[in-house]
Image (cartoon, rainbow, N blue to C red):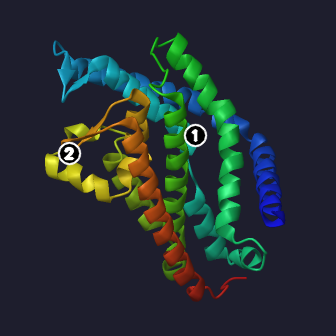
Amino acid sequence: MNSLRRKWLVCRTVADVTYKEWSAYRTHSMVSIIVGPVYFMVQYFIWTAVYGEHSSLGGIELPQMIRYFGATALISYLVMDFADWNLSMLVRTGKFLTFHLRPIHHRSFALFQKIGHRSLGFLFEFLPCLLIFIFIFRVDMMPASLPWTFLSVLLTFLMIFYVNYMIGLTSFWLVQSDGIRSAFILVSGIFSGALIPLDFFPHWLQVIQFFLPFQYMAYMPAMVFTGHYSLGGIELSTQQAVGLQAVALLVTFAINELVRRLAMKQFTAVGA
């Protein structure tokens, strides 16, 4: 009980400090108030032109497609992560040593940081863009099931963190992980469904997505939001989709823990 209370106090303290630290640069977050709606507007015009006279494409109707991209844009504000870049910087400069000597390991510290950072994003990115989508673009942004959407977004929040943290852990072998980070950002942008719904990919590629982390980072939470999940010819209920997401998260966490333990054996505190 005392251990849980201590972890909660540490989490709250780190998240609060991170929130206050980034609050000093909240104008940086406010840029997203412009970027998000512009990205959504581009998607709106592109898909309106693609649909033309068609009522649906790939089994998806135009209003559902618009809601899908609205959901991916808003969810991205809640789950955005910088754990890979931050960890790489700490390893490269040798500052990771200060975290290695603390009673709480850096992965937990980084997760608490993300909670504080995204709390700020919720206020200065998510809420303003949600209001813009609803009152300016007139898009129905009410999720099919608020509780299940909340749970799905939470699982996505953790999935992205653990995946990015693993990328940061490669710095213990490579020192510089910028190449891997850039490659992963490119691949995930395509295969996560953020740019185009995975329904439009070849069937064999859709099936492969069940065994990769990408769909769980954008496509699945967006489909849970819309209330209809289908991929590779497989249709799942909202509960089944979220359950699959939870299993994927557990597998990712197990791999993350394995890589972290191996990385710690490589740690030499060079540059400290």
**Residue to which mark 2 is pinned:** 232
Going from N to C along the chain, the mark reached first, 1 or 2, is 1
Question: Looking at the picture, which amino acid does disc 2 mark?
Answer: Gly
Disc 2 element: loop
| Residue at the (16%, 12%) spot, across then down | 53
Alpha-carbon span between mark 1 and mark 2: 27 Å
Give the quarter of the figure containing the C terminus.
Answer: bottom right
Nearer to us of marks 1 and 2 is: 2
| Residue at the (50%, 82%) spot, across then down | 173
Q: Percent position (x, y) of residue 120?
A: 70, 39
Badge number at residue 78: 1
Question: Looking at the picture, which amino acid does disc 1 mark?
Answer: Leu
Label 2 neighbourhood size at 10 Å, few (<14), some (14-19), many (20+)?
some
Q: Percent position (x, y) of residue 262?
A: 52, 83
Label 1 neighbourhood size at 10 Å, few (<14), some (14-19), many (20+)?
many
Q: Compare residues 222 and 146 and report the one nearer the observer.
A: 146
Residue 27 higher or lower than 170, as above or below: above
Q: Percent position (x, y) of residue 216?
A: 40, 49
Q: Compare residues 117 and 92 and report the one nearer the observer.
A: 117
Q: Evaluate whether residue 117 shows in this view.
A: yes
Q: Evaluate whether residue 30 shows in this view.
A: no
Q: Percent position (x, y) of residue 75?
A: 51, 36
Badge number at residue 24: none
Residue 52 higher or lower than 43, as above or below: above
| Residue at the (51%, 48%) spot, across then down | 155
Give the quarter of the figure containing the N terminus.
Answer: bottom right
| Residue at the (69%, 40%) spot, across then down | 119
